[in-house]
Image (cartoon, rainbow, N blue to C red):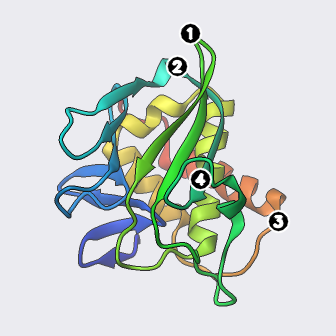
Amino acid sequence: MPRMEAHGTHLGPLELVGGRWAVGDATRPDTHWVEIRPDGLHQHEPDSEGRLVPWSRIMTGVWLTWGKHSGSTNSRGMYTFKGLVAERDGGWLHMTLRHPYESHQLRFDQHTRPYRAVDVLRLESLLRQLVDEGKLHLLGDPEWVGRAVACLTGGRNSWLTQRALRRAATEAIATAGPGGL
């Protein structure tokens, strides 16, 4: 079963809030967060209608970094000895887009709860594998995401090899099924 918290089910910064999945804290006013929609990733930001990145534009290079500025890629791997993300100034979801080709970042504000490093690494691995397999659109199905997250949560908070992360993502994708979209 997915881990249930006061704000819902989560895997690192990915959280179920009010029946929709979001990266970042979607519950506080005036925050940056990324909503996962059937048509793509929608950046929410204060005093703006935000912007949508359609699934078809996302090609590769999906990863998370931590810090106030998107160029803080050096903070990609700052974790505490207890296996938690050390940076608390927010995060960025990075990706490469096509038509035109460009590097793109979506900003999110972190929750007050800490993120386990293993959960963040599993989330990154899931996103990368979905891109590689041409199945990123499955994220637009909230029930599918819930099944995948349930498969990836829990377990030891220890450093994992790339092989173990790929295996966990492969199992989560297979367990979650073909999706309803």
What percent of the width, then of the height, locates residue 89? 46, 67
Residue 161 disc label: 3
Estimate the spatial distance between the alpha carbons at disc 4 and disc 3, rounded to whole Å: 17 Å
Label 2, label 4: how far apart the Cα atoms are: 18 Å
Decide: few, some or many residues near mark 3? Use Cα within 10 Å; few <14, some 14-19, many ≥20.
few
Q: State the quadrant of the N terminus.
A: bottom left
Residue 20 drawn at (x, y percent): 25, 49
First reached walking from the N terminus: tag 2 or tag 4: 2
Residue 34, placed above or below residue 110: above
Q: Nearer the viewer, mark 3 or mark 2?
A: 2
Look at the numbered disc 3 and give the secondary structure of its residue: loop
Q: Closer to the camera: disc 1 or disc 2? A: 1
Give the residue type that dot 4 points to.
Leu
- Residue for badge 2: 57
Kindly identify which numbered label has been placed on residue 99: 1
Q: Are marks 1 and 2 in contact (CB under 8 Å)?
A: yes
Q: Looking at the image, is mark 4 or mark 3 nearer the viewer?
A: 4
The residues tagged by marks 4 and 1 sit, at their Cα atoms, a distance apart of 22 Å
Which of these two is toward me, 47 or 156? 47
Q: Which residue is mark 4?
A: 64
Give 155 or 34, whichever is nearer the viewer: 34
Kind of residue indicated by mark 1? His
Whichever of labels 1 and 2 marks the residue nearer the N terminus, that label is 2
| Separation of marks 1 and 2 at Cα, in angstroms | 7 Å
Q: Earlier in the sequence, mark 3 or mark 1?
A: 1
Q: Amino acid at mark 2?
A: Arg
SS of the residue under disc 4: strand
Labels 4 and 1: the sequence-earlier one? 4
